Structure formats: structure tokens, C-alpha cells
Amino acid sequence: MTFMNKLRQSIFQWIVFFVGIMVLSYGVVLTIVANLGVSPWDVFHIGLANVTPISTGMAVIITGGVIVAIVCYYLKSLPQIGTLINMLFIGIFIDIFLRLPITPVVNGIFEQFLVLILGTFLFGFGAGLYISSKIGAGPRDGLVLLLHVKKGWSISIVRTIMELSALIVGVILGGPIGIGTIIISFAIGPIMEFSIKFWDRLIGKYIKITGSNGVLDPP
């Protein structure tokens, strides 16, 4: 592969990566403004923000940093650059989207469910898109993929277990829960698994490298 081809591929990967995390972040924001209960991890993030002076986006960043540190220590390996950028920018994008006029004002139960469903699908499809860029998965998604590869467990099952665990801690911290929390808890795993396969088939031919979808660089 020539230098120019490598450069074009790298630019394409980073575009896919950033579009993916922006879509994911906007999906998270939609689930928040739907006001029917947020995802389990966001129950935790908002609960953490409620009991500390930090913002919700900053809670996302700090939580991601802790997860990356634990996994790095366990595997004695360094995080991918994409993992670190993901950890920072998802939190930043969430705080930005929450303040921009593109975030809808939801009125009525029908609109709430519509926004919740749209947000959940954008969340899962955005996750699949940025993971398929092979720049590096985010802390939570990387941990899911790590357990999937190392243990052979289904992505859907691992993601669901992690979501429910975060939910329990989030409830203890006073995070918001509702019918939307239940819907997201059981829907996000299958959506994410489908999304990864969908985007890998769609853009895999344009990313002809032996990359890693995981959270860590090789030791």
C-alpha cells in the first residue's frame, strides 16, 4: 500500500471514528431528554454527578478512565489512542449536545417514547460505527469485546450484565430510572451486536488492515 493510500485510509478511519462517537453521544443525550429513564451507565453517570461537583460528561470521562486503568493493569498493556480519545470526547460531546438547540424539547408521552427509541438506536449504531473504524473501542465497549474474545461470551449477554451492574450502583447514587432504563438495558446489547456486524460488512472493505477492535494495544 502506497503512502497516499495509507493516508486516505487513515483519514477515512478517523472520520468514521468521530462520526460514530458523535452519533453515540447524541443518542445518549436523546435518552436523557426523553425523561423516561436513562441507560444504566447513564443512571450511574448522572448519579455520580449528583453526589459530586462534576458534570455528567465529566462523570463519563472519569468512569472511563477508571475502567481503562483497571483493564490495563490486569493485562499489563497500554490503551489504544482511540480508546483515550473516545473516553474524552464522548463526555465532551454529551455536555455540548445537552446545551445546543439541536436537542429537542420533548412534550407528551408519545414524543418521549419516540425520542427514547431513536436515542437507543443511535446509541447502538454509533457504537458499532466507531468500533468498526478499528481505531480502538471505548472503555466500556472495549471491556465487552475483551470478555467476548477472551471468554467466548456473547456480546449481547456481556453488555446486558454490565448494564444491569451499572444500574444497581447508579440507583444507589440516586440516578434517574424509569421504563426507559429497562428498555435500554435489554435493547442496547442486541443493537450493538447487530451494529458491529452491519458496519464491519459495510465499511470493512475500505479498512484493509489487521486492526484491533479492542480497548488495548498489544503488549
Image (cartoon, helix red, strand yellow):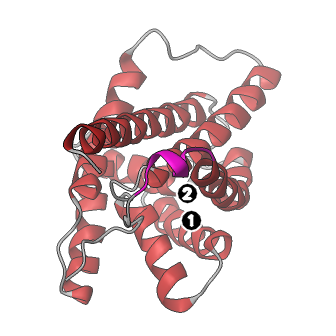
For label 2, count other residues whose C-alpha is less than 10 Å away and answer few (under 14), some (14-19) or many (20+). Answer: many
Asked whether the viewer can see residue 174, the reply is no
Question: x, y (%) of residue 151?
Answer: 53, 91
Amino acid type for the residue under numbered disc 1: Glu
Question: Does residue 99 lie above or below 182 as drawn?
Answer: above
Question: Does residue 105 lie above or below 64 as drawn?
Answer: above
User: What is the distance, in whole Å, between disc 2 and disc 1 at their CAs?
Assistant: 5 Å
**Residue at x-position 42% and y-position 38%:** 16
| Residue at numbered disc 2 | 40
Position of 159 compared to 121: left or right? left
Is disc 2 in contact with disc 1, using a CB cutoff of under 8 Å?
Answer: yes
Question: x, y (%) of residue 157?
Answer: 66, 75
Question: x, y (%) of residue 106?
Answer: 65, 17
Question: Does residue 136 lie above or below 91 as drawn?
Answer: below
Q: Which residue of the protein is positioned furthest toward the right in this rendering?
A: 110
Numbered label tally: 2
Image quarter (top left, top right, bottom left or bottom right) of the C terminus: bottom left
Amino acid type for the residue under numbered disc 2: Pro
Could you tell which of marks 2 and 1 lies nearer the N-terminus? 2
Q: Nearer the viewer, residue 180 or 205?
A: 205
Which picture quadrant has residue 36? Answer: top right
Q: Nearer the viewer, residue 49 or 62?
A: 62
Question: x, y (%) of residue 123?
Answer: 57, 43
Magenta: main secondary structure: helix
**Residue at x-position 28% and y-position 71%:** 216
Q: Is residue 1 magenta?
A: no
| Residue at numbered disc 1 | 163
Could you tell me which secondary element the residue under label 2 belongs to? helix
What is the span of residues highlighted in magenta in the rendered image?
Answer: 202-208
Q: Nearer the viewer, residue 160 or 112?
A: 160
